[in-house]
Amino acid sequence: MAFGRSSRTKPFVEPVTLKILVAGGFGVGKTTLVGAVSEIRPLRTEEVLTEAGRPVDDLHGVETKTTTTVAMDFGRITLREDLVLYLFGTPGQDRFWFLWDELAQGALGAIVLADTRRLEDSFAAIDYFERRGIPFTVAVNCFEGAQRFPAESVRGALDLDPEVELLMCDARDRESVKNVLVAVVQHALVLADRSPAAVTT
């Protein structure tokens, strides 16, 4: 019996999975960023802000915010068929900082999301990653109505080391967020002295 040429199937390659943290101040857009890019329904641990929390929750600049992340946000994105990122959004308030060490375990790198209206809220996250030697990229979330500043001015205000990349982004836009994720992965691989094969989307 004659058989036709058998079709060759591409062998399955188990994708590499990398853990990326998304950090920054309270209300800077971390939950929005994870939700914008995640290919699965993101896990969120948001609770409603209450009057009882006002003495410890600084709402300056985010007065309209009604919820807060109390544990983490979680999402997943496939950058390539052989590269999957797991995204962990950290809580932004000081009272939840005890969770950061646990979330940071095994992370390849991090995004520090910044708001030019409250740049001082970024210092804690930057200091955290610098002290622990975790590679990070700063992404300035360009909020509507917020004054825009040149990247070099923001870099100077944050006192970033020369090798730390700073990008402008829109945390609501999937492609904008993907560009930031590609940048942080490439940056982390270079610093890890691994073969920095280009990450393409």
Image (cartoon, rainbow, N blue to C red):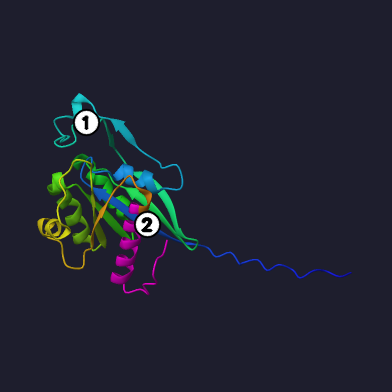
Q: Quadrant of the C terminus?
A: bottom left
Distance (Cα) linking label 1 and label 2: 31 Å
Q: Which residues are magenta?
A: 176-201
Residue at the right extreme, as displayed:
1
Neighbour class for label 2 at 10 Å: few (<14), some, many (≥20)? some
Say above or below: 193 vs 56.
Answer: below
Read off the residue under disc 1.
64
State the image coordinates of residue 28 (x, y, percent, origin top left).
23, 43
- Tell me the crowding category of disc 1: few under 14, some 14 to 19, or many 20 or more residues within 10 angstroms, Cα based: few
Q: Main secondary structure of the magenta part?
A: helix
Query: Residue 34, image x and y in percent?
Result: 35, 46
Tell me if residue 178 is in the magenta stretch.
yes
Frontmost residue, 104 versus 38: 38
> 74 left or right of 116?
right
In the image, what residue type sits under mark 2? Lys
- Measured from the top left, where is residue 182 in percent x and y? 35, 61
